Image: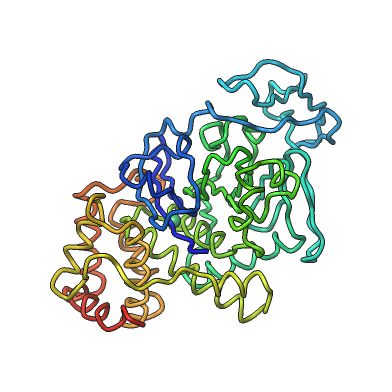
Amino acid sequence: MNRKRFLITLLAATLLLVSCGPTVPKESTDASIVSSEASTMSNESSDAAVVSSEASTMSNESSDAAVVSSEVSTMSNESSDAAVVSSEASTASNESSDAAVVSSEASTTEESKVFPPRITLSGNHDDHVITDQFCYVEGEKYFLLLDKDVDLPGDFGDNVELIIDEIEKLTGYTFSIPSTVYTCDNSTVRFGYNPWDGFDFGMKVPIYLYPDRESKGYISSASSEFMNLQLYELYSNDLWNSVPAYRDNPWRRDNYVNYETVAHELTHVLTCRRTALTKIMTEGCADYVAEKVIKKLADVTGQYDFVESAARMDLSYHVKNEVTAENAEEVFRNDYSDLSTIERGDEYTLGRMLCLFLEEDYGASSLHDYIAAVANAGYAYPEFLSDPSPNDINKMTDLMKTTFGNDVFTKFGAWYQTHKDQ
Ligand SMILES: [Zn+2]
């Protein structure tokens, strides 16, 4: 399957959210603005899209959150004050009529807030956990926040931990930023009902796995606060077979866990927690890091899922319009902001190649150094949380020259010409 990506920038009030995912239908590629919630994306097309939308796409109107059954075990994130989780309460706080409501007599105070239960994974690939309610897995550096109908192999959590460790090693940055504690409120969940409201994540990365159970085209995404994964291979068979758009299109589902997507989105979390970046660098470094991390883990572990993830990466080396020594700086300053002229997905390809070039010519710490330079220039989280303006992009372009030399773009353009056919 030709898996293309696209970037969707959701500018919510307080967070920058970047995402990538499968594809959008051919017929929708003319639209320059696509709502991530409204569009129904099929995997038929070959064009990835660059789309943007307002924060309103994160509203609750299309929620289809699952009902939490009343017999689930009760558990509190921080305290032992257990209470009954009930699906019968009717004080829905959003517009969705089918969003579930969890209520408990003790839910009015923070310390007695009841959260879905914690589960553990065996660590063995062949063991599967199929969720039938909201629940969570806690790792050393992450939380997996699960809806029902998720099918996780027993080694999924361990593999996420491996990916996090490799990303930290490669970039020289940690996910945790001691001065920051990430909590979760309703604005940080895309799909409506949020059983994790008020959950204390500490400095760990919250990773949501909420199946797109109506095939609305939800895609994997990330921000400084959290990430969410839409991996069809992690949907339960029961869910898959109950949705015609899935059941009748088995080719949409990989027969391996696509850890490249996990690594790509995790890299977004890491960089977003440090600084804003241009589109080219945001997507480029996510693909660059994912490629290196997954290939390494494929080599080191030999695991089928890592090997397949590495083998199926979409590592194209061509962008629509030529990038040369003469125009490379201009391309970077434009940052593919003109939707009418770019080949969708070019920012991924060119950005990845720029990172490869920087590593080759300026050393393994080049990406780390550039991120530090941009963060130090005033774009660091949490002070700066929006898409860079054209003026910001110009400053970020100048920082590339300050960090690596005035000839960095001419050298890159020449390098690109000799590497694009590899
Ligand atoms: Zn991305």
Q: Position of residue 167 (x, y in %)?
A: 53, 67
**Residue shown at the point (55%, 44%) measured from the top left:** 182
Q: How is the image coloured?
A: rainbow
Q: Is residue 124 left or right of residue 368?
A: right
Q: Position of residue 2 (x, y in %)?
A: 48, 64
* Pick the front one: 312 or 269: 312
| Camera sees residue 42 | yes
Pick the quarter of the image with the C terminus. Answer: bottom left
| Above or below, 220 relative to 264 | above
Question: Most extreme residue toward the left, as rendered?
Answer: 326
Q: Position of residue 278 (x, y in %)?
A: 31, 56
| Above or below, 63 relative to 323 | above
Q: Position of residue 347 (x, y in %)?
A: 33, 61
Quarter of the image for residue 104 reads top right
Question: Most extreme residue toward the top, as rendered?
Answer: 90
| Above or below, 361 relative to 233 | below
* Pick the front one: 274 or 293: 293
Quarter of the image for residue 287 reads bottom left
**Residue shown at the point (59%, 68%) measured from the top left:** 165
* Pick the front one: 29 or 302: 29
| Camera sees residue 78 | no
* Pick the front one: 323 or 27: 27
Tally of numbered tags: 0
Q: Ligand 1: which quarter?
A: bottom left
